[in-house]
């Protein structure tokens, strides 16, 4: 569940997982700095039931954590898919320059740019792009990538990679001429 953005390029989201003891639900408020793709200290919460029950039990803690990171709750954040005619036009996962690495590449009318990299999990399924979230404060997107974990019961790991839409695009290579 996407919670909100900050004007300084941070994103907060809420993850739900089965509790480690197979009872209850573990909720984690995750924070990331989309400028350098580094995780910030978040918070693990335990509550039974759905997201409404968790919010009722921990609203003050979650609100305080978001305020401490200058993150503004945004109620209508939803993953969208890149589409032709609206930047960014695509996101690709490509083999990276190092063995086992995968580059996250954002495409737009102005060209493309690498916005991050991740390591292929051994024996796991290939990572998949889930979509992107648009910041309401600046021309920036957060690209969500799902990656299977070794412990399938815990579910996939979600990585977010930040990309500015107004800077540092590498123009597309000119078509090569064949003779």
Image: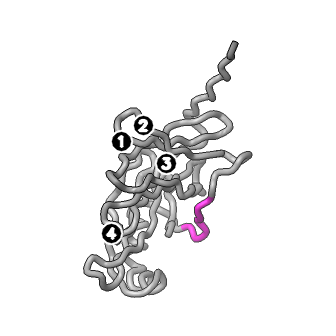
Residue pointed to by mark 2: 96
Q: Earlier in the sequence, mark 3 or mark 2?
A: 2
Are dots 1 and 2 in contact, CB under 8 Å? yes
Residue 140 is marked as: none
Asked if residue 20 is among those painted magenta in the image, a careful observer would answer no
- What predominant SS class does the magenta segment belong to? loop
3D distance between C-alphas at marks 1 and 3: 21 Å
Q: Which residue is mark 1?
A: 100
Residue 157, given in percent of the width and then of the height, sits at 39, 61
- The span from disc 1 to disc 2 (Cα, nearest Å) is 7 Å
Q: Earlier in the sequence, mark 2 or mark 4?
A: 4
Q: Position of residue 82 (x, y in %)?
A: 64, 51
**Residue 11 in the image, given as x and y percentages of width and height:** 47, 58
Q: Nearer the viewer, mark 4 or mark 1?
A: 1
Disc 2 and disc 4 in contact, CB within 8 angstroms = no
Residue named by callout 4: 43
Q: Disc 3 on helix, strand or loop?
A: strand
Task: Look at the image and give the residue range highlighted in magenta.
Answer: 74-80
Q: Secondary structure at mark 1?
A: loop
Tell me if 78 is positioned left or right of 72 in this view: right
Few, some or many residues within 10 Å of mark 4 (<14, 14–19, 20+): some
Viewer-nearest of discs 3 and 2: 2
Which numbered dot is residue 162?
3
SS at mark 4?
strand
């Amino acid at each position: 569940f996407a919670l909100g953005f900050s004007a300084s390029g941070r994103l907060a989201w809420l993850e739900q997982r089965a509790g480690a003891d197979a009872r209850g639900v573990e909720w984690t408020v995750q924070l990331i700095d989309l400028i350098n793709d580094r995780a910030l200290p978040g918070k693990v919460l335990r509550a039974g039931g759905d997201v409404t029950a968790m919010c009722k039990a921990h609203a003050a803690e979650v609100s305080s954590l978001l305020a401490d990171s200058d993150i503004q709750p945004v109620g209508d954040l939803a993953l969208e898919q890149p589409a032709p005619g609206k930047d960014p036009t695509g996101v690709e996962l490509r083999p990276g320059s190092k063995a086992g690495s995968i580059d996250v590449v954002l495409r737009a009318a102005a060209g493309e740019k690498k916005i991050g990299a991740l390591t292929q999990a051994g024996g796991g399924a290939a990572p998949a792009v889930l979509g992107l979230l648009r910041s309401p404060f600046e021309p920036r997107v957060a690209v969500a990538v799902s990656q299977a974990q070794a412990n399938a019961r815990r579910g996939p790991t979600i990585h977010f990679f930040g990309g500015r839409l107004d800077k540092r695009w590498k123009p597309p290579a000119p078509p090569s001429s064949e003779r």
